[in-house]
Structures are given as structure tokens and as C-alpha cells.
Image (cartoon, grey):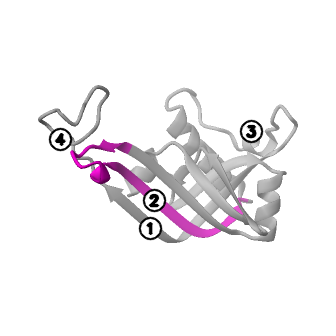
């Protein structure tokens, strides 16, 4: 499960915005047993967290469709992990810089020749002028589900129910 979280590229942050849920897809890093994300320091996500820090972070990967001669037994192979807890803005500059460095290591490994500086994290502004916030979700509970791949049953373009292999 931890390797899945380390390698997965997109997760979905779920927040409770009064009567309606608010879910946003994000890049993330699973680091020091927590989920770290980043984004604008102002906006809907930050406003919701300010009112209610309860959060769920979900990561799911489709591993392929599994065929069966019986249509009702056609299935999907997947892995999913849901982490539940409270999300908070990271105020410690060292922690925020470490998390952002881990994110760079994950998404663009080896691209930069030197480590991310604390001053960059502290002073960076987006093209719209917004400061970047680093957020952290420490899971209070985690659930995972796996429906393993059966290579013999895996669908591929051109495969039909008349094929001898499942």
C-alpha cells in the first residue's frame, strides 16, 4: 500500500463544504506517513479547510478490465487507498521545503541540479500573484482495496468472447 501511494500520480482531496462535498484532483506526495499537497494560499479549498479540517484523500488506479464469457462477470482490476484525517497548512518552513522537494523528486526526478531552497518556498508567487501553501493530511485511518490483475482474463483491443483464452 505504501509503495502504491509513493508511486501513484494523482489523488483526490475530499472536503465537506457545508451541504455539498468538494473534491479536487491533485498532485501529491506520500512522505513521512502523511499526504502533502500544494496550491494557492487563498481560495475555495483554503476557505473550506478553515471551516472544517476533516478530509479524505483517495488514490485509485485502474489496472485493466477483466473479461469473462458471462457478461455479468466482467470486472475491473484496480487498487485504491482512502486516507481519512484532518488537513492543515504546514507552517514550518523546513517541513514545507522538504515536502516540496519530495514532490519535485517524484514528478521531475533529476531535473534540478540543486535542492529546493527555503527562500523559494517562502517567497514564491504564482503567475496570478498567489502565494503557495503546502498542506498536510496525517491519516487517522486508512482503508485499501485491491482487485488483482488476472493476465489471462485481461481485456485488450481486439479480444472477443470467442477467443479460447479468458
Circle nearer the N terminus (3, 4): 3
Circle nearer the N terminus (2, 1): 2
Check the image and report above or below for 26 versus 111.
below
User: Where residue 60 appears, x then y in whole percent?
Assistant: 47, 51
The quarter of the displayed image where residue 44 is located: bottom right
Which numbered tag is attached to residue 81?
2
Circle nearer the N terminus (1, 4): 1
Circle nearer the N terminus (2, 3): 2
Say what secondary structure mark 1 lies in.
strand
Q: Depth check: 108 or 57 in front?
A: 57
Residue at 69% from the left image edge and 63% from the top image edge = 15
Residue where numbered disc 1 is placed: 143
Residue where numbered disc 3 is placed: 120
Mark 1 and mark 2 in contact (Cβ < 8 Å)?
A: yes
Residue where numbered disc 4 is placed: 166
Q: Depth check: 18 or 81 in front?
A: 18
Gap between marks 4 and 2 measured at Cα = 28 Å
Q: Could you tell whether 87 is left or right of 126 in the image? A: left
Q: Which residues are magenta?
A: 63-90
Instruction: Please rate how many residues cluster around mark 4, counting C-alpha atoms within 10 Å: few if below 14, some from 14 to 19, many from 20.
Output: some
Amino acid at each position: 500500500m505504501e509503495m502504491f501511494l509513493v508511486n501513484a500520480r494523482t489523488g483526490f482531496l475530499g472536503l465537506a463544504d457545508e451541504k455539498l462535498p468538494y473534491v479536487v484532483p491533485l498532485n501529491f506526495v506520500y512522505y513521512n506517513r502523511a499526504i502533502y499537497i500544494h496550491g494557492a494560499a487563498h481560495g475555495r479549498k483554503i476557505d473550506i479547510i478553515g471551516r472544517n479540517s476533516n478530509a479524505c484523500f483517495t488514490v485509485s488506479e485502474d489496472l485493466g478490465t477483466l473479461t469473462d464469457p458471462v457478461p455479468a462477470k466482467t470486472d475491473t482490476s484496480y487498487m485504491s487507498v482512502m486516507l481519512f484525517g484532518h488537513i492543515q497548512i504546514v507552517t514550518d518552513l523546513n517541513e514545507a521545503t522538504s515536502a516540496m522537494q519530495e514532490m519535485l523528486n517524484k514528478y521531475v526526478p533529476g531535473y534540478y541540479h540543486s535542492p529546493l531552497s527555503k527562500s523559494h518556498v517562502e517567497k514564491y508567487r504564482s503567475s496570478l500573484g498567489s502565494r503557495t501553501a503546502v498542506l498536510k493530511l496525517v491519516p487517522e485511518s486508512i482503508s485499501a482495496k485491491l482487485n488483482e490483475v488476472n493476465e489471462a482474463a485481461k481485456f485488450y483491443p481486439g479480444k472477443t468472447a470467442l477467443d479460447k483464452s479468458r
